[in-house]
Amino acid sequence: MADTRPYTGAELTNSNALYRQLVQKITDYAIYMLDPMGVILSWNEGAQAFKGYRSDEIVGQHFSRFYTPEEREAQLPMKGLSAARQHGRHEAEGWRLRKDGSAFWASVVIDPILEQGQLIGFAKITRDITQKRAQQQEILKARDAAERQSRELSGLYAFLHTVIHNIPTRVLVEDKADGRILLCNHDLQTHQTGPRTLLAHLATDALLMRIKSELSHFSEAPSREIRLKLETPEGTCHLKCLTLEITDNGEATGQRLYLIDDVTKEHTAQATIRHMAHHDALTNLPNRLLFGERTQALLKAPDGGIGRVGMLLLDMDNFKTINDVLGHHVGDELLCQLAARLRQHLHHGETLARIGGDEFALLVPEVHSDIALSDLAYTLATSARAPFQLSEHRVQTGISLGGVRVSQEIDSFEQLMRCADLALYESKRQGKGRYTTFRPELAQLARERLDLENDLRSALAQKELFLLYQPIYDISGTHPTGFEALMRWRHPVRGVVSPLEFIPIAENSGVILEIGAWALVEACHEASRWPSDQRISVNLSPAQFGRQALVDEVAHALEVTGLLPARLELEITESTLLDASQRNIDILHQLKRLGVRIVLDDFGTGYSSLHYLRAFPFDRLKIDQSFVREMCDSREALAIVRAVTSMGKSLDMEVTAEGVEHPEQMALLRNEGCSHLQGFLLGRPGCAQDIPGLTVIKPTAQT
């Protein structure tokens, strides 16, 4: 039975002493008492062990010294006491400071001490739980990491699921043991969420069967790649299939992954690229690269193609003029029509190629004689002479050709091209519209032309070039009104070289710019010594007219020679003008402002003569000698002469007829109203000092 009698005073005293001794000796907890204001009244061994203060050092101090400065500034210690007073107990955790300034994580309990309802102090119990907190933090971190990993894996799974089921690649996973399909992202029997391609129209079972059939031809390997061509209801499908053996930590799982891509578009694009690399974009004919490959393939035959493989090079006559005068779109249309027309005559495996500009090449795999190659060339030339209807223009032109057959000496693609090109050059040199078979002497002629070009480059410095002057008469044929300057070359070895031979070389090499500028000054200088009623005509080449510096060169020639501008005539052919572009018209007006006269030479041989006359007021028209030569026998030629002279009168332009060689021609031209005459009948080209009564020394305003 419990003892319920009250304690005596002595018993209470002994009991309090026992409790104080018990509390004092506890070392696992810091237990101390505070007065109502927070001043420390007692201190046990546990407090000394936790916080490093002896009892005599800390009793009487305020307990807030165990808090950080920030916590003291925030009144956190007193807030804890206030909470304990209000709620009967206050529990908290936080960092506390030891005597040496180190911190530990503390669990704190503050209980108010009351006597007869009055607060007489606080009992505070503190425990160092730094290690426990660290363990808890690690547990929390591990938990957070696990949750985060779980979320990441879940997100990764969702991501992979979305990717796999929406990419165009078909992904299959097969169990190799029983052939079961463990994963399939696209199938005709399932809902298709990804992009629809030709691949999507292929059933999985049939596709896998075809892939395995192809794989059976390859040895086993962890990774293999094959390409398939399949026919689907939507068209031909090209597939690329990569197979991978699935492993886990290096161990085979018995599963195989198939990655199948529809590469139809890539295959088509590559085929298009290959076609573009080997074909001309305008005509769709093979280009020079493919032409060379096919030629070399024929040359690799056991017999090397000797005596049976032939090659033709051909280009269109006057194409540059047609292209520039009528427009590039018309020129392109003409090239396409010519290509189509030539293809109609090819039936035996020939390769027709466009190798640049208006130049075509024809590879003939079986031609056993030069005559047979010549017959084919003339067939093509005849076909090309028929008129072409180009939009609103009707154009009649032709082609020049050069041919060669493979021989012991000519057995490579480069040699064939070079020899055919030499033959083509000879055809054009002889007057275009022709065919020439290569012969060895053409190579010698080419070397001679090269030598001639080299000699021409130094001819001006060596003073081998000179000018002759052909008179231009009024219609009476008795009074010369001026002279045309004609360039000649006296070669130290070859003698006098025809301008028909060296002028084209000068124009092709660019030397014409230098010798043309020299001829302009030389002619003006000579004319400055003539009577004031005599004009000098100087021909301009297309290369000269194509430069803006031409205006400055003409101004310089007038300045240094003192020739009056009105006495200088600049002769420009229709082929020189090319087209009535604003730039060309501007140059003509600039020359006109210098005071010189502009003559349109070879009138009637171009393609837009009337357009020129509308665009610029020429001072003189020169009727081409081809019309003058035939006017007595050809009604058509006479009609052209009559039209030109009539047009000249209407436009207030002088009209000169070139190539007058017979009195009958002169009489007809006089009747038709031609204003001036030029030709052998009236006078051949000669040196200025040999023309009677012409060379007169006169004072000039030379600078």
Image (cartoon, helix red, strand yellow):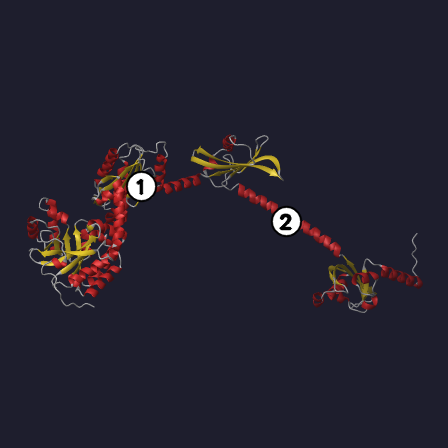
Q: Which residue is drawn at 83% across and 62% down?
A: 44
Does 225 appear above or below 119?
above
What label sits on residue 417 in the rendered view?
Answer: 1
Does 238 appear above or below 614?
above
Sort mark 2 into few (<14), some (14-19) or many (20+) by Cα contacts within 10 Å: few
- In this view, the residue in front, 596 or 197, is 596
From the viewer's perspective, tell me whether residue 235 is left or right of residue 575.
Answer: right
Q: In which quarter of the image is the C terminus?
A: bottom left
- In this view, the residue in front, 434 or 262, is 434
Q: Which residue is drawn at 92% across and 64% down?
A: 9
Sort mark 1 into few (<14), some (14-19) or many (20+) by Cα contacts within 10 Å: many
What label sits on residue 387 in the rendered view?
Answer: none
> From mark 2 to mark 1, how far is it between C-alphas?
74 Å
Q: Which of marks 2 and 1 is nearer the N terminus?
A: 2
Give the residue at mark 2.
148
Q: Determine the secondary structure under disc 2.
A: helix
Instruction: Please state the horizontal and vertical placement of residue 207, each as a whole percent of the image.
Output: 50, 33
Badges 2 and 1: C-beta atoms under 8 Å apart? no
Instruction: Please state the horizontal and vertical placement of residue 653, each as a whole percent of the image.
Output: 13, 57
Rendering quarter of residue 685: bottom left
From the viewer's perspective, tell me whether residue 197 is left or right of residue 128.
Answer: left
Q: Determine the secondary structure under disc 1.
A: helix
